[in-house]
Amino acid sequence: MKNETKKENDLMEKIVSLCKRRGFVFQGSEIYGGLGGTFDWGHFGLALKNNIKQSWWKKFVDSRRDMYGVDAAILMRQEVWQASGHVAGFADPMVECEKCKKRFRADQIEDKKKCADCGGKLSEARQFNMMFQTKVGASDDSSAVSYLRPETAQGMFVNFKNTVDAFHPKLPFGMAQIGKAFRNEITPRDFLFRQREFEQMEIEYFVRPADWEKYFEYWKGEMLSWMEEVGLDMSKVHELEIAKEDRAHYSSRTVDFEFDYSFGKKELFGLAYRTDFDLKNHGLEYIDEEEKIKMIPHVIEPTFGVDRAVLALLLSAYTEDEKGDEPRSYLKFKPNIAPVICAVSPLLKNKPELVEYANTKVFAPLKAEFGRVAWDDNGNIGKRYRRQDEIGTPWCIVVDFDTLNDDTVTVRDRDTGEQARIKVVDLQNYIKGKI
Ligand code: GAP
């Protein structure tokens, strides 16, 4: 058991180290000692995150007829958060050590009486509101108070009327948004898992009240199918019915999709039945032309955390094996998610004829077609393969002396290490076929 835990901790350490070393994710404000619960994204991490968001948008918005996108302002009037119940109820229980003043989330510590750090006495738990408060404009009075949004959902509810007036959608229909959310977590932890600034991909799906159970089941299936499409290890995904006392204040039913992270089985995404809670509190309604009545639709909310998706994908994709004579580690990403689709290399970088050919006849056209194409001429070929394996590049293409005679290149597969000789004119179709 101890060995298992050590292995899991080692895995997390390896992933955090890979993310920094290979330019995926860095600690926020790192050169000033770091700011807890914030991370900055490097070139490859950003590419991975963008691919995840694109895949989500394509499936849930672009390929559907009943979905309307929104990109709402992060700052909203305080009345939004009063109506949504977040000012009154978006809080976690917090205890403080009377000796060292360190604060903990009361529901996440084993000993509720004694400080785990210094042994001091812990205070009684009190509710700590997790919204970041700020002031809008130069005025300092209470009417200037605003909050950084703790969920993207409200940006959709406050645009419900605008969307209905502009597009006249018939029930059922949905609104979708991808964007930042902010929570002043008491104890941010576990790398990307619990942050203070993160991204969400959310859908508010509006249905007739009698239909909610049907659409709840439908969205459960859609969520699972996207998780599979994007390449999550589905043997590590589990559904959990959330008990009434543990549900958010707006939810009458919640199913969490949990993931076996290396630090335990914890929430990845969620599906909630928000009833008419939000539209009613914002005083919004809908004219159902089919039923010829004014009514308040009910809401099914599939919600996805982008950062948790990245973390679960990293944990799903990380693989170690022995290829050739040395051990290697690689990220077994699906090609549509991988930060780089293929890397192009001249066999030797001091041979101008190879470099010229690789650059103009291979790299440039692939780059124009796929965008996420890397040029790699550093070190020997073995080192280049290892480097590309580590960031999860599915194919490495090498231009060698034979290329100059027969216009073929070597395409090496990341997972099997197998190499195929492909005509340069067929490269784009070869890769498209594999994707
Ligand atoms: N609108 C509903 C809502 O916000 P939530 O379960 O509180 O529900 C939705 O958050 C998703 O956002 C979670 O399933 C998770 O993926 C992600 N998430 C929540 N808090 C997070 C945090 N502190 N750091 C990173 N991701 C977080």
Image (tube, rainbow, N blue to C red):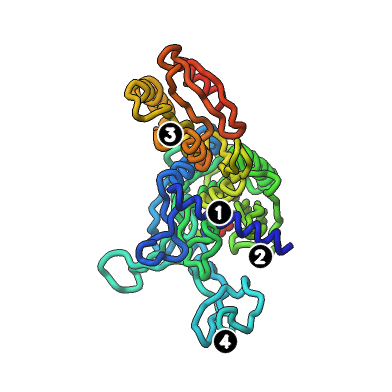
Is label 1 in a helix, a strand or a loop?
A: helix
Q: Which residue is mark 3?
A: 372
Question: How many C-alpha atoms fall within 10 Å of the one at disc 4: few (<14), some, or many (≥20)?
Answer: some
Q: Earlier in the sequence, mark 2 or mark 3?
A: 2
Mark 3 vs 1, N-terminal side: 1
Q: Is residue 284 visible?
A: no
| Label 2, label 3: how far apart the Cα atoms are | 43 Å
The CA span between labels 4 and 2 is 29 Å
Q: Name the residue carrying label 2.
A: 246
Whether the residue under disc 1 has CB within 8 Å of ligand 1? no
* Residue located beneath label 4 in the image: 120
- Above or below residue 15? Residue 415 is above
Residue type, mark 1 in image: Lys
Quadrant in which the N terminus is drawn: bottom right
The image's mark for residue 14 is: 1
Q: CA distance from mark 4 to mark 3?
A: 53 Å
Mark 2 Cα-neighbour bin, 10 Å: few <14, some 14–19, many ≥20: few
* Amino acid type shown at disc 4: Gly
Q: Residues within 10 Å of mark 3 (few under 14, many from 20)?
A: some
Answer with mark 4 or mark 1, whichever residue precedes in sequence. Answer: 1
Q: CA distance from mark 3 to mark 1?
A: 25 Å
